[in-house]
Image (cartoon, rainbow, N blue to C red):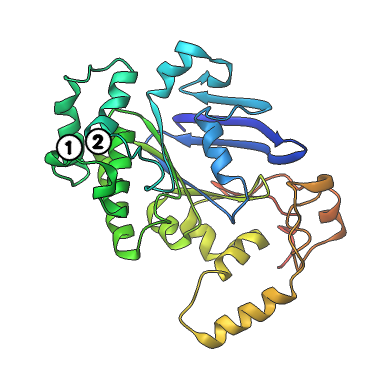
Amino acid sequence: MNAIVEAAGIHLSFAETRVLSDINLAIAKGETFAVIGESGSGKTTLGRVLLMLQAPDEGSVLFHGEDITKLSGARLRRQRRRMQMIFQDPYASLNPRMTIGETLAEPLVVHGLENWVGAREKVAVALQMVGLEPAMAQRTPHAFSGGQRQRIAIARAVIAGPELVVADEPLSALDITVQGQIIDLFEKLRDAMGLTYVFISHDLPVVRHFAARAAVMLHGRIVEIGDPGVMFASPAHPYTRALLESVPVPDPEFERHKISRAARAPAPMSRAGQGGACPYVARCRHALSLCGEIMPPLKTVSPGWQAACWLLETSL
């Protein structure tokens, strides 16, 4: 694999709460890599660590082979031009006091690629790339819909020519029609610019369509990783299966059955790998005594597909 970014042995705690535990992954150049899991699973924190917006307590993050956890100041800023983030809320992520032209020009000026006057042409091109008119550069964010604001946020992320883009739940604030348009835009920009995406999402159908690989996270750990088409068809980890069962189905009887079963399930554990146990042990209907004692390592299910479960050699 020609990896653009690699994480090795990443651990991170906030106060006494472990939020990332032993994260190891490599993402290929040009790949769309999804990170999925329920709220609080560590998805956003992992995305921030990959860009060094949040420093880990332990471990390394290699970008083109250079450990960016060791960088600071001007050296880190030079690498950050090549790595950008798209935030979840298109309403909160844009400065309401700046015009769209100023918002898009700012990364070019900050990274020394253009001055404010010289950036105008590139701003116009960036707006066209995301399906907006160059004349819109004179407006402020309040004049735009949610979908248009997310297009602007995408333009801001790509205008300085990054290689890696972390998109944190970029569709969650948008209606279903606009979501499809934004996914089409992501694909168009990926193909035109050779971008690598880390796509953080809880929308499993979108991940199946859009991503080449996906990591399933639970309480700060990766519990399954592989091709989402293969993985979702026959999940190896009980938690992945539970996520798939949570996707709404247009069948009232089936949905009532799911709700009834969920009501009988134990409460989730509050910390990643608490006591060294599997983070899903409190909710797993198949848990062994070993599951409550030792966190299982990621084991190969088939080439390119791994899961962290002691039950892999048994019939679930």
- Residue 111, compared with residue 85, is above or below; it is above
Measure the alpha-carbon separation of dots 2 and 1.
Answer: 6 Å
The residue sitting at 69% across, 26% down in the picture is 58
Q: Residue 82: give x, y in percent of width and height.
A: 38, 25
Task: Please state which of residues 247 and 308 is positioned toward the viewer in this rendering.
Answer: 247
| Residue at which label 1 appears | 138
Residue hosting label 2: 99
Which residue is drawn at the image coordinates 43% and 56% (left, top)? 172
Q: Quadrant of the C terminus?
A: bottom right
Residue found 31% across the figure and 36% down from its top: 97
Within 10 Å of disc 1 (Cα), the crowding (few <14, some 14-19, many 20+) is few
Asked where in the image residue 105 lies, by quadrant, the reply is: top left
Residue furthest to the top in view is: 74
Which amino acid, by three-letter code, is at mark 1?
Answer: Gln
Q: Residue 115: image x %, image y %?
A: 22, 16
The residue sitting at the front extreme is 97
Instruction: For residue 205, say whether it is visible.
Output: yes
Please say if 246 is above or below 184.
below
Mark nearer the N terminus (2 vs 1): 2
| Quadrant of res 281 | bottom right
Residue 217, compared with residue 245, is above or below; it is above
Number of the label disc, if any, that sits on residue 49: none
Mark 2 and mark 1 residues within 8 Å of each other at the beta carbon: yes
* Identity, as a three-letter code, of the amino acid under mark 2: Thr
Q: Position of residue 249 (x, y in %)?
A: 48, 77
Callout 2: few (<14), some (14-19), or many (20+) C-alpha neighbours within 10 Å? some
- Disc 2 secondary structure class: loop
